[in-house]
Image (cartoon, helix red, strand yellow):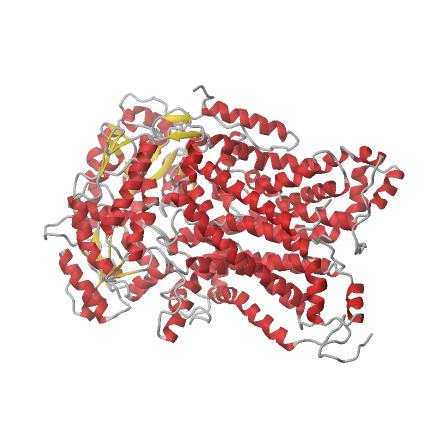
Amino acid sequence: MTTHTISTAPPPSRGRRREKLDWKGWAFVGPFMVVFALVFLTPLAYALYLSFFQEKLIGGTSFVGLDNYVRALTDPQFWESFGRVLLFLVVQVPIMLALALAAALALDSARLRGASFFRILIFLPYAVPAVVAVLMWGYIYGDQFGLTSNINDLLGVDAITPFAKEWMLVSIGNIVTWEFVGYNMLIFYSSLKTIPSEMYEAAALDGAGAWRTIFSIKVPSVRGALVIATIFSIIGSFQLFNEPNILRPLAPNVITTFYTPNMYAYNLSFAGQQFNYAATIAIIMGVITAVIAYVVQLRGSASEVR
Amino acid sequence: MALPLARSGRRDPLNPRKSTTLLIVMIVYALYTLIPLVWLLFSSTKTQAGLFSSFGLWFADDVAFIDNLVATFSYRDGIFLRWLGNTLLYVVVGAGGATLLATMAGYGLAKFRFPGRRAVFAIVLGAVAVPGTALAVPTFLLFSELGLTNTPWAVIIPSLISPFGLYLIWVFASESVPTELLEAARLDGAGELRTFFTVSIRLLAPGIVTVALFTVVATWNNYFLPLIMLSDPDWYPLTVGLNQWSAQAIGAGSQPIYNLVIMGSLLTIIPIVIAFLLLQRFWQSGLTAGSVKQ
Amino acid sequence: MKHLPPRARRRALAAFAAGAVAAITLAGCSAGDTAGGGAVGGDGSFDAVEAALEKGGEITYWSWTPSAEAQVAAFEKEYPNVTVNLVNAGTNNEEYTKLQNAIKAGSGAPDVVQIEYYAFPQFALTDAFVDLSQYGFADFEDDYTASTWNSVTDGDAVYGLPQDSGPMALFYNKAVFDAAGVAVPTTWDEYYEAAKAIHAANPNAYITNDTGDAGFATSMIWQAGGQPFQTDGTDVTIDLQDAGTKTWTENWNRLVSEGLVSPTSSWSDEWFRGLGDGSIATLVIGAWMPGNLMSGAPDGAGDWRVAPMPTYDGTPASAENGGGGQAVTTQSKNPALAAGFLWWLNNSEESISIFLESGGFPSTTAELSSEEFLSEAPEYFGGQKINEVLADAANNVVTGWSYLPYQVYANSIFGDTVGQAYQNRTDLNDGLTDWQDALVEYGNAQGFTVNK
């Protein structure tokens, strides 16, 4: 049913064919782009437009040029939140992807009893809505009656304090990791499944052991998946919102309204009615995220998808 | 096939010896995955008072599972059932539509050299990089102008875009839909759409199923934009509804219904599990997706 | 700088988008309506309202109160020509967000909306509410307590009708106090001593919880005689270090810094647990709390009692904490009818009794002084006639308080500023100063003249 290719797919058609194929592609891409234009591009354009204005409760709207951008770039709250998601990104994403890759390799290795059982177990947290996930972990983290307090009582000392200022980011990172390892694992796993068995046989004939097989065959083959998973994880980290926002009522002083840039934009919009400034923050974050994602993509893939 | 035993575990590479260490490691990880869900399971059997007075990872004195079940479905004239129906609508139309759009678009990107091709994915990725919460208000205002707020369309239309699905099908189509096949179809006089629906889709099946699974989960768990767009609880999806029940505990005249929130949460997870179990068969049949060959 | 007026701007964008999505069927959509005018249909008399109720029509009502359903049903029975769509659009902030969005978009707001007292100034200022004095609503002044009436009016303009009130009292767990051998405090100094005693007797028990709550802090400042927020048109003065505020911080600082208040957040499930099992021994909170205690902390039945709020010098004084009313929005297409519903909702015997049955605390002077109300003796409170204490509190509310015209926003950043003092157990005055700075900056940026 599917073709297994080891080398790149057949070279693209050239010559006369190229012109013949030219515009038909839009028939297929069209519907997607139309909805995309409505749902993303138009609001984005509007947000961009908003970022050059300032609307006041008293006095209406006026054009302010780049004032909002200057304000954002010198806003300590914005940079604090940015630093926080950057830290989060640098620590949580590698851990999560490493776990996902390890799990995928384990499931693919055929050395595991009950692999399909583990596969769905690991995927399960992804199926849980963030609202519910935070509810569950909120219980576990509860330091009055939760599991954490039980452990602390057992140890006789306040060993685990998930809601303390120093640990809050770790607690959130734990929830995010718990939620998304399964998703990323599935991406890597399906990528691993494309490796044809001939490669393994050839490696075995060459005398490669299990670990050698992993590092020389499996990992390089999922490189593309790794890159795209990293990019989407980076985007997700910079946009961290759901988990801290839902946790906020449990720790309203540790999780400030500007805990992450996305929360900052959200609270500016909805609590402060400062849509213009919120749009500015969003655009700046978008640009930074896009740049970093692009850099990762450049470094990560040796060859672009043609 | 068998090799001389130089090291343990190195026999037939396609059927190696099972590892116990690996099993133990995976069990530990599985426990980590399961503990919150186990808490949810136990909690769903408790009354509200029981929730407050018992240990989280075991039963309380009363087992009220059936009571909670009945109460969840009958609370406020069965609004939970309505929310369930709403969510099914959003998922079927939203995820179905998203899968269709992503499949067509990914196929188009992979198989046709058209002008603007390179820009498409870059633009999609770039737009997705902008934090969604700040786009929420412009989107709200836009949809309000179109008269779509507080209608199912406000939830469905934004969920039709799956950038990851687009990428997945793009790569998948490049790999597993040979251009020769398309050429042959063209020579036979078949139109592009016809070819797509009769020939290509079958080849893309495992990839489509993957995208379907991801979009089903995403639309099932869709929370933020529906929260902004909908003010009438009759149109809420389950996530927003549960949030409202949870918020009922707060403030003057509050009516905490933690036991219903928990049972509702449990019920919200189960359909996805079933969907996964049903769809995962497709992976057995030679899944090829997601990797960029060097 | 010439620019398109907001609505035309949005229309242009919409036209662009609509053109781009011509292929998509927009079933069931109708173009957004222009903002309904706050029709000036009244001449200062109630006649227009009565006529509208007779004629009938359809209106939408946003509320999260548990009694709303029963009230709407009773209303429709009395006025069969009127249909009321009851929508629970979320609790406080969620509903305010939706309301603000609808106002900004120019459509989607309900006819009648539930609003807490602290949010009234904000919406009134931005012309979101109809001035009901045109329908003769000024005549209802004497039906309500002074502080609640003050909260829904601004000069001669009447922006809504009060529904409930929340004069503060001291709710305490008698069992805990008896076990610790502590008498019920009448002054804040006694309260502090009680806090120490209770926590010493049982390290898991606290006299109360406080992780920083804007509503609580402002109410406490209110009771202490502070008037940190003064508004005159668009001139705003903020002084969160005035005498009254300092009186409160002096008292409360010692409780926070010595770890005498529980770090549990209010309205969390751990909070309800603590109320039920005695680890939170008192609540200094509004008079609407009994209903919440009964439904959320059933384990504490029989243990709780009500006493007057402790004061600084022994003379009775209280403040309002929470509570709200309803208003008619300017987007309403039938303001007279909406006003009629509002009148029935908060001023008719039948509606008020339904409200009381569901555990609400009234704002009407008639109910507050009625025999029946005052002689209620719930079992949860060991048969105490709690309403006598609470009605007394209503009479002792300190006068002269007002909220900011952007209080909703102010409360949202309380955690960022004052909350840090709670978190780090530092001086509350520093946190309040931070809060003040942020509020001054915001106010000036929004076009008000703050502290100038």
Name of the residue lying farthest toward the top: C2
The C terminus of chain C - image quarter = top left
Q: Nearer the viewer, residue A137 or A4?
A: A4
Q: Give x and y (percent) for residue A56.
A: 37, 30
Position of residue C332 measured from the top left corner of the image (x, y, whole percent)? 40, 29
Give whichever of B94, C259 is nearer the camera: C259
Where is residue C104 shown, x and y percent of the image? 43, 31
Compared to residue C239, the image places residue C296 above or below, namely: below
Picture quadrant of residue B102:
top right
Q: How many marks?
A: 0
Q: Quadrant of the N terminus of chain C?
A: top left
Residue C62 figure quarter: top left
**Residue C85 visible in the shown view:** no
Residue located at (56% from left, 71% from top):
B28
| Residue at x 75% of width, y 50% of height | B204
Q: Nearer the viewer, residue C361 or A266?
A: A266
